Image (cartoon, rainbow, N blue to C red):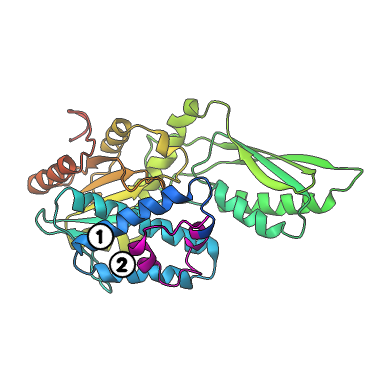
């Protein structure tokens, strides 16, 4: 099946189509590929129709994804660029004038001159299950007849480097020892993640991991979580809040936040179970956790689904925001239909 269809704008953004991360979807879109491509066509068409200042640089960045040799790295860079396009399209569709930030200096990804705000757009993707899967695929590529299943309880938003290395080492060792007389083996591991920020109200649970290997034709790597993941959403969300707020541990992000009153917009689609949380919970949860000295004037979260060119948002204003900035952020939230904290939550 050829899924190129009427996607002239997207094809022009892809440049070297044969090497681009989306290339395979053009000829073998699978069950969801057509919707992915339709969503991307909508996004790039929206941006190109309005042509915000420096938009051509964003198109070049998108084309340059074809030059990234590591397919996993290329896909993650695509996801980050896509999130930026989703937010930009939302701003454009809300009738808000915008410009992309200047390269080579500390400024946000998107500038909203009429509101006097910047938007710094990011994705939080700490090392977790998908990264373990990627490492195992590479390490076990010479042993296709080994089936590996990992069961996590609770579902992890992140896994420590020590535990990821231990899992990789022990699984590879166990796979090498499997034979017809001993076709299966199991072992357990525990991860005790630490908070990135000094926030005593966070209760971050330990992660229990059961690993099972067996000889099986074709093999594969799979994982599962607890039987009722929603029951464990609250403790896992503490890890998620920690990850989002800890964006400012990156000095470059702090400089961007200081260049202009700046809203941090964070895509949490691949951050544990964050996508399951409702917007009101997000807004209220951030409102009571943002530190007094947080450099961003507000934090917005979204979960960008590859099937859709739009997304929903929740936002909380930082305690340090001035009345003038607070009014600008409130106007932004209203025009993008962002969910704000309930009245009386923290300083909102």
Q: Which mark is residue 58?
A: 2
> What element does badge 2 sit on?
helix
x and y, in percent, of residue 100 in the image = 23, 64
x and y, in percent, of residue 72 in the image = 53, 60
Residue contact between numbered discs 1 and 2, judged by CB atoms under 8 Å: yes
- The one nearer the camera, 158 or 138, is 138
Residue at the right extreme of this rendering = 181
Image point (75%, 49%), residue name: 218
**Residue 61 sits in quarter:** bottom left
Q: Is residue 324 left or right of residue 286?
A: left
- Marks 1, 2: nearer the viewer: 1
> What element does badge 1 sit on?
helix
- The one nearer the camera, 168 or 109, is 109
Is residue 262 visible in this depiction of the protein? yes
x and y, in percent, of residue 215 in the image = 81, 45
Split into 4 quadrants, where in the image is the C terminus? top left
Callout 1 crowding tier (Cα within 10 Å): few <14, some 14–19, many ≥20: many
- Residue 11 lies in the magenta-colored region: yes
Q: Is residue 32 left or right of residue 303?
A: right
Image point (21%, 29%), residue name: 342
- Residue 257 lies in the magenta-colored region: no
Q: Say if 177 sits above or below 234 in the image.
A: below
Q: Is residue 168 left or right of residue 82?
A: right
x and y, in percent, of residue 168 in the image = 67, 53
Q: Is residue 154 left or right of residue 328?
A: right
Q: Say if 69 sits above or below 33 in the image.
A: below
Image point (44%, 68%), residue name: 65
**What residue sits right under mark 1 in the picture?**
47
Image point (26%, 37%), residue name: 287
* Segment tinted magenta in the rendering: 1-26
């Amino acid at each position: 099946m050829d899924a190129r269809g009427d996607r002239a704008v997207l094809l022009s953004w892809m440049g070297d189509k044969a090497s681009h991360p989306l290339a395979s979807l053009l000829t073998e879109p699978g069950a969801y590929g057509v919707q992915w491509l339709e969503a991307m066509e909508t996004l790039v068409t929206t941006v190109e129709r309005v042509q915000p200042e420096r938009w051509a640089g964003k198109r070049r960045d998108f084309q340059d994804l074809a030059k990234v040799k590591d397919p996993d790295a290329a896909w993650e860079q695509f996801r980050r660029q896509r999130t930026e396009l989703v937010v930009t399209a939302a701003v454009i569709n809300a009738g808000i004038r915008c410009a992309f930030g200047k390269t080579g200096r500390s400024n946000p990804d998107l500038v909203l001159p009429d509101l006097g705000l910047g938007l710094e757009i990011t994705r939080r993707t700490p090392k977790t299950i998908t990264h373990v899967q990627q490492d195992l695929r590479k390490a076990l590529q010479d042993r296709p007849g080994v089936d590996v299943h990992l069961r996590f309880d609770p579902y992890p938003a992140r896994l420590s480097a020590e535990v990821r290395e231990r899992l990789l080492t022990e699984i590879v060792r166990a796979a090498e020892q499997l034979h017809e007389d001993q076709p299966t083996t199991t072992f357990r591991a525990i991860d005790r993640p630490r908070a990135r920020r000094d926030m005593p109200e966070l209760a971050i649970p330990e992660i229990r991991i059961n690993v099972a290997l067996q000889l099986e034709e074709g093999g594969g790597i799979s994982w599962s979580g607890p039987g009722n993941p929603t029951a464990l959403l609250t403790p896992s969300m503490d890890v998620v809040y920690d990850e989002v707020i800890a964006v400012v541990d990156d000095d470059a992000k702090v400089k961007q936040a200081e260049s202009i009153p700046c809203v941090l917009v964070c895509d949490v689609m691949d951050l544990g179970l964050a996508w399951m949380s409702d917007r009101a919970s997000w807004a209220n949860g951030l409102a009571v956790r943002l530190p007094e000295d947080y450099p961003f004037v507000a934090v917005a979260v979204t979960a960008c689904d590859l099937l859709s060119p739009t997304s929903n948002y929740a936002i909380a204003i930082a305690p340090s925001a001035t009345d003038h900035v607070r009014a600008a952020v409130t106007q932004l939230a209203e025009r993008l239909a962002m969910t704000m904290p309930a009245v009386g939550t923290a300083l909102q």
